[in-house]
Image (cartoon, rainbow, N blue to C red):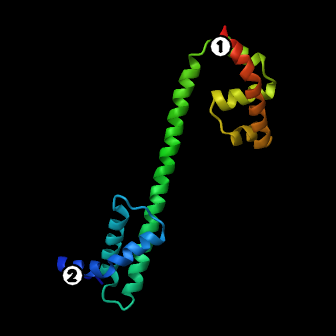
Amino acid sequence: MDNHLTDKQFEDLLKQYNNMIHYQIHKLFIKDYEGEFYQEGVTALWEAYRKYGHDPTFPKMATIYIRSRLIDKIRKHKRVQDRETVDEYIDHQIAFNKQIEHFDPHFWTTVRQNLSDKQWLFVEKRILKGYSLKEIAEQEQTTVDAVKGWGQAAKRKLRSALEDYYTT
């Protein structure tokens, strides 16, 4: 059933359910600085009325619609945030890899000479190629903790070796 509302009727309905929209936002711990979640709640109220407006279950259905739409919006925000974080990481890695390409070959020879095979593997795969600790562990058939250990040992060794490199 499609229920039509005049602007005045919807204003009255919104006045009646306004506190409930704010309550759901508060209950979900949403910081709605720009009002986009409130607007989502208003839209959900409109849709709930169009579908269940004259049904005795409307108050319950309005609550469910509003809460569900707010949760969907939270999830969408999270996906966007995750995607932006990944994009920023990739952009950073590309810029970092371009910087590495400009280091002189003597630098990498110095680095390689001071490390064990496992430590060099860490530098090569983690720093130069940008693999995650988990990816390296899977490729080398070991644990993430072992890979972390290689990295810590490599960092300790390289501190003194690279100090000599930069002071010359």
Q: Residues within 10 Å of mark 2 (few under 14, many from 20)?
A: few
Q: Is residue 100 visible?
A: yes
Q: Which residue is mark 1?
A: 166
Q: Residue at x 78, y 18 (%)?
A: 114
Q: Residue at x 62, y 33 (%)?
A: 130
The quarter of the rendered structure image containing the N terminus is bottom left
Q: Quadrant of residue 112?
A: top right
In this view, the residue in front, 38 or 90, is 38
Q: Residues within 10 Å of mark 1 (few under 14, many from 20)?
A: few
Q: Is residue 36 above or below residue 92?
A: below
| Residue 5: % across, % down | 22, 80
Q: Residue furthest bottom?
A: 56
Q: Which residue is mark 2?
A: 9
| Residue 55: % across, % down | 35, 90
Could you say which disc has been placed on residue 48 in the image?
none
In this view, the residue in front, 106 or 155, is 155
Q: Is residue 4 visible?
A: no
User: Cα distance, mark 2 to mark 1?
Assistant: 75 Å
Q: Is residue 136 above or below residue 157?
A: below
Q: Residue at x 72, y 22 (%)?
A: 159
Q: Nearer the viewer, mark 2 or mark 1?
A: 1
Between disc 2 and disc 1, whose residue precedes?
2
Task: Give amino acid for label 2.
Answer: Gln
Q: Quadrant of residue 65?
A: bottom left
Local secondary structure at mark 2: helix
